[in-house]
Image (cartoon, helix red, strand yellow):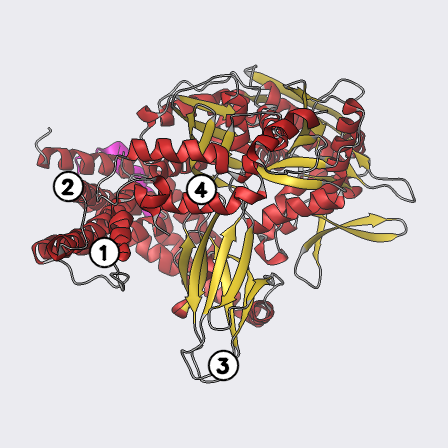
């Protein structure tokens, strides 16, 4: 149905573009997903048969032959069969087992690893355990959404634009593409979420020139992107983010507090399904607290003998949210710095993602970026709208618009000494390529291994290891072979490598082996073995370490006390002195737990003194500069 | 590739960033693979690369020098004489800032953090002064670029001047970048 318009445009250019057929836009979110189509030049987000646009990103596998439940039915199954129900699979996209933190491995779903080092979710079905990957879970969601769009358009949909967090790396983008393919879809573009939101915003505002920031805090990920809009051209200038930070973490923090408050026997007898119920209620209460000052959480018969009731206040929630939100501040400032801009250069700050409904988010963003945030976009729908607009650009239905996106992470290779050598710097406009020349280091060398990395850290090992590629040399004396390697990041931000022998002029696409590094695995094994051996002297070592720390802290505290003298005031000094005495006692008695808690107490007691000392330092500085 | 040719401009050492951007955007609308399909992708990649070169004073000078057949610019020479003092000053300030930032990252207790505050403030002040000095040097370099005009192959003196300018720019920009990064890192602790 869009074929005619697209064809006309393309014949002007004399270019034959993608075959016809509609392209749909999908926002594949951590907690919710949506699908949009272009209909007569308008973006339509397609609802389900009950009129709901959001699809919960939940899949529940069933015993026997029945297909998995997707969306709302799966959500209902969550508290009945939590062990077969998968939430937030996006967090596992493209992440190897070795990338996961220990806390992530002990989530609700049982996570396992396969021979390739990939992370899988194991479902205990009656016929035996079934293992699924995160892309497989995502494929179920994509299939459901594509079917929705096909029904709406009354034609089989096969092409899709899928959005991902801007800060997704190569492996995470690849995994998303893979998910689309296993759902039988051709993924014509992987699009960054904040960029999509900017498209949705800028679509009907024709700016001569406007720079905007997009603050995107979703269920599981955070991004801040800076864009410049220039009459239909959307140019991303910089982006920074964290793919493991979102509203989910706030739910988890609240849940942890409530769980701690439960009576011990209730805690011990709490089944997975009861935990799931509590989590659901926590999330609902959190949402209510965006508009209310208090929310009551009430779960009759959380266990057969215990009914749960608790009032959660907005202040309590905000206290838990603050440290999480504080982490997003750095990314905003980083993106601004990379774009070479100051807050006053921005025309608008857009908020996207369900978590930005929280009033605290809005006030903090205003404080950091100096603009009253623009909340005209629906934070749940903006990304899907943008994905659909991009689909329109790609199919030719939207003209005179183009998006210039960037790569969020620097691409590099490991050099001698384990350092990262950047080949394509972060925030480079896509698609882009860069070349590097390699030669043989020894006579007759036939093979060279190159480790490819993504990230911003100086040391190679601190960055994300994308994979390894083999360069083959024609045998010859050292330093005579010449292989030019071209690294290309395509418009999806996905890497392609081409090796060209400049002597023989042979060219070849090089695949990256991204399997887990055997030596890494061995090192891991060695570490775990040594840990086991060390168990017996662990107590001893812990004591030595703590004592060392305690002595340092003591020395530091005494120094601070003498530096402050009496000027700091008794109310700041006395609590510190008292805590110091307690710590000395704990040290004399050699009690590890007591020592640890007394250190914590001392730190807490010295907070006012520390603040006073900081103020003194600032004052001294200002005096020296003649300001005071 | 000749980036100047691609943008249809003379190989001059100074270019107006706004004009460059307008050309880049206007061509992107046609050449980006989203609009033109896979066929225009190589042309866009070239445009993209040329833009990156022309936009940066440093890369642009380097490109001119390369177009004039000067190679091995990767290993730029020693610090120019009149910048040596500044170089020493920047080097030591960057190093000590780096150590301080690492200590601050490691500082767990409130008192430990407070004890570093004075040093952090002082470093911040020093870095900002250095940055404004670098800015003013950078500005005079730009002014020299503007008056330079087209570099001609038959004028060895102008090529020599350009090389010298390129060297100074390379150093000054690198230091600016590093100083800005340290300021950014310290700004987390001092408001």
Query: Same subunit under labels 1 and 2?
Result: yes
Separation of marks 4 and 3 at Cα, in angstroms: 36 Å
Q: Is residue A569 magenta?
A: yes
- Does A624 sit left or right of A482 as displayed? left
User: How far is the residue under mark 1 from the one under mark 3?
Assistant: 40 Å
Mark 2 sits on what residue?
B129
Instruction: Pinpoint residue A335: horizontal percent, then vertical percent.
Output: 39, 37
Label 1 Cα neighbours within 10 Å, binned few <14 / some 14-19 / many ≥20: few
Closer to us: A532 or A463: A463
* A469 magenta-colored: no
What are the residue bounds of the magenta stretch? A566-581
Relative vertical location of residue A527 with respect to residue B84 in this rendering, above or below: below
Is residue A181 shown left or right of residue A127?
A: left
Based on the displayed image, in which of its 4 quarters is residue A509 positioned?
Answer: bottom right
What is the spatial separation of the Cα atoms under label 4 and label 1, in whole angstroms? Answer: 32 Å
Residue A257 lies, in percent from the top left, at 58, 34
Chain identifier of the residue bearing label 2 in the image: B
Whether residue B16 is visible, yes or no, is yes
Q: Are marks 1 and 3 on the same chain?
A: no
Q: Residue at x 47, y 73 (%)?
A: A503
Work out which residue is located at the far right of the displayed protein and give it. Answer: A65
Residue, disc 4: A429
- Mark in the foreground, 4 or 1: 4
Q: Secondary structure at mark 4?
A: loop
Residue at 59% from the left image edge and 52% from the top image edge: A100
Q: Secondary structure at mark 3?
A: loop
Whether tag 4 and tag 1 are in contact, CB under 8 A, the answer is: no
Which residue is tagged 3? A445
Chain bearing tag 4 is A
Q: Classify 10 Å Cα crowding around label 4: few (below 14), some (14-19), many (20 and above).
A: many
Circle 1 chain: B
């Amino acid at each position: 149905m869009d074929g005619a318009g697209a064809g006309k445009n393309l014949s002007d250019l004399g270019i034959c573009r993608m075959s016809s057929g509609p392209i749909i836009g999908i926002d594949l979110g951590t907690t919710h997903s949506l699908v949009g189509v272009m209909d007569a030049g308008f973006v339509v987000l397609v609802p389900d048969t009950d009129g709901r646009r959001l699809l919960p990103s939940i899949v529940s596998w069933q015993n026997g032959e029945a297909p998995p439940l997707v969306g709302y039915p799966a959500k209902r199954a969550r508290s009945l069969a939590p062990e077969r129900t998968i939430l937030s699979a996006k967090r596992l996209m493209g992440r190897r087992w070795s990338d996961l933190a220990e806390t992530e491995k002990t989530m609700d779903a049982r996570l396992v690893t396969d021979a390739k080092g990939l992370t899988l979710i194991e479902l205990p079905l009656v016929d035996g355990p079934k293992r699924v990957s995160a892309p497989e879970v995502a494929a179920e969601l994509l299939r459901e959404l594509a079917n929705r769009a096909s029904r709406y358009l009354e034609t089989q949909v096969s092409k899709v634009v899928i959005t991902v967090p801007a800060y997704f790396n190569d492996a995470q983008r690849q995994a998303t593409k893979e998910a689309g393919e296993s759902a039988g879809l051709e993924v014509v573009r992987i699009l960054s979420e904040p960029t999509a939101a900017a498209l949705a915003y800028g679509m009907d505002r024709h700016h001569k020139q406007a720079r905007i920031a997009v603050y995107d805090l979703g269920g599981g990920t955070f991004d801040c992107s800076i864009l410049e809009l220039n009459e239909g051209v959307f140019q991303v200038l910089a982006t920074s983010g964290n793919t493991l930070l979102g509203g989910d973490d706030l739910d988890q923090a609240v849940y942890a507090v409530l769980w701690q408050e439960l009576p011990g026997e209730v805690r011990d007898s709490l089944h997975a399904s009861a935990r799931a119920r509590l989590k659901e209620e926590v999330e609902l209460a959190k949402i209510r607290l965006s508009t209310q000052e208090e929310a009551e959480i009430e779960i009759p018969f959380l266990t057969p003998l215990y009914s749960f009731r608790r009032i959660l206040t907005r202040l309590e929630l905000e206290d838990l949210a603050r440290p999480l939100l504080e982490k997003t501040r750095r990314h905003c400032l980083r993106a601004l710095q990379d774009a070479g801009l100051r807050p006053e250069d921005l025309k608008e700050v857009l908020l996207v993602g369900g978590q930005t409904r929280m009033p605290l988010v809005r006030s903090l963003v205003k404080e950091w970026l100096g603009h009253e945030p623009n909340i005209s976009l629906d934070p749940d729908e903006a990304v899907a709208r943008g994905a659909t607009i991009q689909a329109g650009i790609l199919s030719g239905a939207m003209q005179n618009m183009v998006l210039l996106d960037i790569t969020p992470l620097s691409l590099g290779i490991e050099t001698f000494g384990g350092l990262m050598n950047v080949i394509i710097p972060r925030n480079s406009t896509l698609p882009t390529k860069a070349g590097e020349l390699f030669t043989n280091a020894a006579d007759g060398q036939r093979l060279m291994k190159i480790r490819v990395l993504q990230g911003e850290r100086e040391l190679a090992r601190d960055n994300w290891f994308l994979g390894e590629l083999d360069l083959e040399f024609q045998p010859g004396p050292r330093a005579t072979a010449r292989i030019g390697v071209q690294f290309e990041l395509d418009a999806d931000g996905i890497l392609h490598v081409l090796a060209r022998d400049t002597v023989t002029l042979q060219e070849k696409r090089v695949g990256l082996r991204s399997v887990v590094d055997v030596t890494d695995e061995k090192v891991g094994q060695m570490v775990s073995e040594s840990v086991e051996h060390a168990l017996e002297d662990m107590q001893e070592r812990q004591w030595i370490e703590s004592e060392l720390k305690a002595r340092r802290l003591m020395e530091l505290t005494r120094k601070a006390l003498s530096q402050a003298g009496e000027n700091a005031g008794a109310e700041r000094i006395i609590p510190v002195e008292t805590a110091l005495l307690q710590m000395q006692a704990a040290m004399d008695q050699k009690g590890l737990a007591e020592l640890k808690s007394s250190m914590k107490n001392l730190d807490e007691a010295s907070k006012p003194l520390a603040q006073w000392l900081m103020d003194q330092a600032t004052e001294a500085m200002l005096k020296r500069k003649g300001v005071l | 590739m000749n980036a100047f040719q691609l943008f249809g401009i003379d190989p001059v050492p100074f270019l107006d960033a706004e004009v460059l951007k307008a050309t880049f955007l206007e061509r992107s609308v046609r050449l980006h693979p989203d609009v033109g399909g896979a066929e225009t992708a190589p042309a866009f990649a070239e445009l993209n690369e040329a833009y990156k070169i022309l936009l940066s004073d440093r890369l642009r000078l380097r490109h001119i020098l390369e177009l004039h057949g000067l190679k091995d610019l990767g290993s730029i020479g020693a610090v120019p004489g009149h910048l040596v003092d500044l170089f020493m000053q920047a080097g030591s300030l960057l190093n000590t800032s780096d150590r301080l930032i690492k200590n601050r990252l490691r500082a767990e207790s409130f008192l430990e953090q407070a004890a570093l505050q004075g040093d952090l403030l002082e470093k911040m002040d020093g870095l900002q002064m250095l940055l404004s000095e670098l800015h003013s040097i950078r500005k005079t370099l730009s002014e020299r670029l503007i008056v330079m005009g087209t570099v001609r192959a038959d004028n060895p003196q102008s090529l020599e001047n350009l090389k010298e300018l390129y060297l100074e720019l390379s150093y000054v920009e690198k230091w600016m970048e590093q100083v800005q990064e340290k300021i950014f890192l310290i700004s987390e602790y001092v408001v």
